[in-house]
């Protein structure tokens, strides 16, 4: 089944994300975490893609396990900047052979030691989307950035390029993590005004430790609001308290989004089924409405 068909159902959908291990040794642990997350009855589980290629084969393996063994919809991420076009084509064909119908098409970050991709590589996600469309009838998702992508000085450029990307055949968008819902509402207003009509899944990251916050900030450049910084300041020194406060903060963000008419939420669950389960417990009655 295609994820877009599920998202178009008139009910609340919560999805989760897992990431593959750095080395093959870690695969059993990730599969075990994925099995636990699947028990939460998610709309789908997405599997990230290692930009350096190191974990890319495990993305397909885990996505296939989710679909075939756990009978949950799976979304395989695929990046293109750090692989040649032929390598990317091979991955797409492998996903097709495995029966994976849903791909999140990404450019990936440009590695620090690499100049802008050469002629043998796709330069932007929109080129990858066009390529995937040629390989079969996939449901294609793509990324978007409520606070703007770090490479763009002007948000207007971001939205112009996003519109071009969606026009190449994107079925739905998932946002970069954010911690202030007003930023998301403002972004939604601007993209709808620009004529982008596909479903947008807000990406919510439960921050359960001070070190995770630092990593998230480095990766996404996101702005942490004063309310979140106060939590970190007061509870960051106690792992248990910070975990509880981080889960409560993410739950609160989700409840606000649902109360304001958002139907589909993606949770960056980071291979932590206990955190995912606690959020789902907090939402147990809310998601029935
Ligand atoms: C939901 C989500 C999931 C992610 N999953 C992964 C993952 O699994 N693995 C991973 O390595 N990374 C992942 N990332 C990170 C992502 O790869 C990086 O943010 C990357 O820098 C941009 O990827 P993109 O697909 O958004 O690129 P693009 O859409 O190609 O955009 C990249 C930049 O180029 C600009 N641009 C686009 N088109 C043009 C044009 N025609 N001319 C000039 N500029 C243009 C855009 O505005 C943007 O600044 C994810 C990000 C998100 C939000």
Image (cartoon, grey):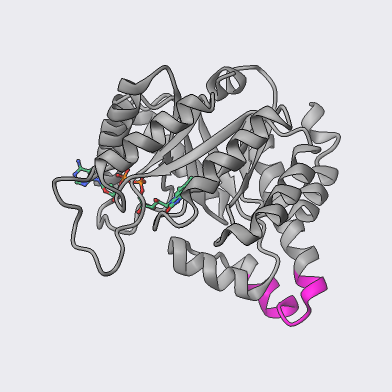
Judge whether 237 appears above or below 221 on screen: below
Looking at this view, is 279 or 113 the one in front?
113
- In the rendered image, residue 235 lying in the magenta stretch gets the answer yes
Looking at this view, is 47 or 57 the one in front?
57
- Location of the C terminus by quadrant is top right
Q: How many marks?
A: 0
Q: Is residue 260 visible?
A: no
Image location of residue 193, percent across then percent down: 35, 30
**Residue 131 placement: quadrant:** top left
Q: Residue at x 79, y 38 (%)?
A: 40
Q: Is 241 left or right of 199, judged from the image as shown?
A: right
Q: Is 175 left or right of 39, judged from the image as shown?
A: left
- Location of the N terminus by quadrant is top right
Image location of residue 34, percent across then percent down: 71, 45
Q: Residue at x 81, y 47 (%)?
A: 277
Q: Residue at x 67, y 57 (%)?
A: 206
Quick one: which residue is furthest to the bottom in this view?
237
Q: Is 23 left or right of 287, judged from the image as shown?
A: left
Looking at this view, is 214 or 40 the one in front?
40
Q: Residue at x 25, y 58 (%)?
A: 153
Q: Is residue 277 visible?
A: yes
Image location of residue 129, percent across then percent down: 33, 31
Judge whether 121 appears above or below 53 on screen: above
Q: Is 184 left or right of 82, judged from the image as shown?
A: right
**Residue 230 placement: quadrant:** bottom right
- In the rendered image, residue 116 lying in the magenta stretch gets the answer no
Magenta stretch, main secondary structure class: helix
Residues shaded magenta: 229-242
């Amino acid at each position: 089944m295609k994820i877009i068909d599920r998202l178009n159902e008139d009910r609340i959908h919560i999805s989760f994300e897992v990431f593959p291990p750095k080395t093959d040794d870690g695969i059993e642990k990730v599969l075990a975490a994925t099995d636990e997350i699947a028990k939460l009855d998610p709309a789908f589980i997405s599997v990230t893609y290692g930009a350096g290629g190191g974990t890319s084969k495990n993305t397909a393996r885990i996505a296939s396990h989710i679909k075939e063994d756990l009978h949950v919809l799976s979304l395989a991420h695929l990046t293109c900047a750090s692989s040649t076009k032929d390598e990317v084509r091979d991955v797409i064909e492998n996903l097709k052979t495995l029966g994976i119908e849903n791909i999140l098409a990404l450019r990936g970050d440009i590695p620090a030691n690499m100049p802008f991709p050469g002629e043998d590589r796709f330069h932007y996600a929109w080129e990858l989307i066009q390529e995937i469309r040629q390989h079969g009838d996939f449901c294609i998702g793509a990324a978007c950035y409520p606070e703007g992508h770090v490479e763009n000085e002007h948000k207007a450029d971001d939205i112009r390029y996003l519109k071009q990307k969606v026009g190449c055949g994107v079925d739905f968008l998932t946002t970069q993590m954010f911690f202030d819902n007003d930023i998301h509402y403002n972004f939604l207003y601007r993209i709808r005004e620009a004529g982008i009509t596909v479903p947008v899944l807000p990406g919510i990251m439960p921050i359960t430790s001070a070190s995770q916050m630092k990593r998230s900030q480095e990766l996404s450049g996101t702005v942490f609001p004063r309310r979140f910084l106060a939590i970190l300041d007061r509870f960051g020194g106690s792992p248990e308290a910070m975990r509880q406060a981080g889960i409560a903060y993410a739950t609160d963000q989700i409840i606000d989004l649902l109360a304001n008419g958002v139907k589909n939420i993606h949770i960056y669950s980071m291979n932590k089924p206990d955190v995912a389960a606690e959020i789902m417990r907090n939402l147990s009655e809310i998601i029935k409405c």
